[in-house]
Image (tube, rainbow, N blue to C red):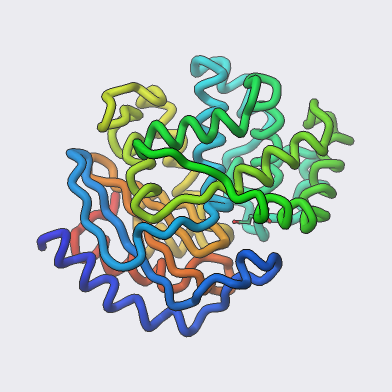
Amino acid sequence: MDITQAIRAAAEAARPAATGGKVADYIPQLRELDPHRFGLAVVELDGTEHVEGDVDIPFAIQSMSKVFALTLAMQQCGGERAVRREIWERVGREPSGDPFNSLVQLEHECGIPRNPMINAGALVIADLLIENCDEPVAEILNLVAELTGETISLDPATAAAEEQFSDRNRAMGSLMAAFDNLVNPLDQVLDVYNKQCSLMMSARQLARSVRFLANDGIDPASGRQVLSSSLAKRVMAVMLTCGTYDAAGEFAFSVGLPCKSGVAGGIMAVAPDHSGICVWSPPLDAAGNSLAGRVALHDLTDRLDLSIF
Ligand code: GLU
């Protein structure tokens, strides 16, 4: 089936599902999102863009930033052995089976977060970025600017609200510091994390920005090797198994692609050797993933036979 037709059909099938979800309300910037927004973008490796709906409205990427932060941390390590030593000794690679901000698991597992896609793991990655980059947030912004071909900025009001709401992340950070798994001052680590969550990107830009993963680590727009193909594979594996909170099994089952969602209702997906995909619809299901977003990706991957399985 033609991709343009498929995204139109998937959007039509998915839009009504949004009414069953609930927009995140822990900060005003999310609470005020229009629940009727819906955008779906598929950007092929050759640059052809297929879009439907609100694909050019920037929204806070929230947890999706964890993919870019991990990518930058891997780049900074500068090789697979260093990645093993500096990242995988401090963060695991198992699905958590617990909410993305669970403290209980972290206590049980001596301050080693289950994976880099949950908040505790993302704090360790932010800590690593502080050690390795002069300006971690600016470097994340540079990375996404390079991948999208456009200037990306962050929303200071969202970052400030995240900071105000960061008690639980602060608790996780303190726990990890007590287990010697954070090196830098917690305020500094939280600042990087809150700011990376506040990057404003559109569905079209997010779809472009994950194409390097679909292309063996090479950004198809510039030809630059962003990550080695082996590391790109690892990032996708972590997205598939841990990228959609406590519903990664359901996503593997129904969508069959490495995905990462965020609490503003975005979900980006990687279709290896094919495209980068992003869907945006703010109302979330009980697991915290965009409800219509999941329906759209399920429908789209069935129509285009994109599941990796
Ligand atoms: N800023 C949110 C938090 O750390 C991100 C949540 C998300 O998108 O999963 O609580």
Image coordinates of residue 183 in percent, x first then y, are 80, 26
| Left or right position of 198 against 296 | right
Q: Report the residue at 23% width, 65% height from top.
A: 7
Q: Which of the two residues, 195 or 46, is positioned nearer the viewer here?
A: 195
Give coordinates of residue 247: x percent, y percent.
52, 63
Looking at the image, residue 159 sits to the left or right of residue 201; the answer is: right
Rendered location of residue 99, percent (x, y): 67, 60
What is the residue that sits farthest to the left in this orientation? 1
Q: State the quadrant of the N terminus.
A: bottom left
Q: Is residue 68 depicted above or below 293 in this figure?
A: above
Residue closest to the eye, 129 or 244: 129
Residue at 30% across, 39% down: 214
Q: Residue at x 49, y 76 (%)?
A: 35
Question: In the image, is residue 127 above or below residue 1?
Answer: above
- Report the image quarter containing ligand 1: bottom right
Q: Residue at x 78, y 31 (%)?
A: 181
Residue 202 visible to the viewer: yes
Total residue callouts: 0
Q: Position of residue 48 (x, y in %)?
A: 18, 46
Q: Quadrant of residue 87?
A: top right
Instruction: Locate residue 46 relative to residue 34 in the image: left or right.
Output: left
Residue 108 visible somewhere in the drawing: no
Q: Residue furthest right?
A: 178
Query: Which of the pair 250/193 is nearer the observer?
Result: 193
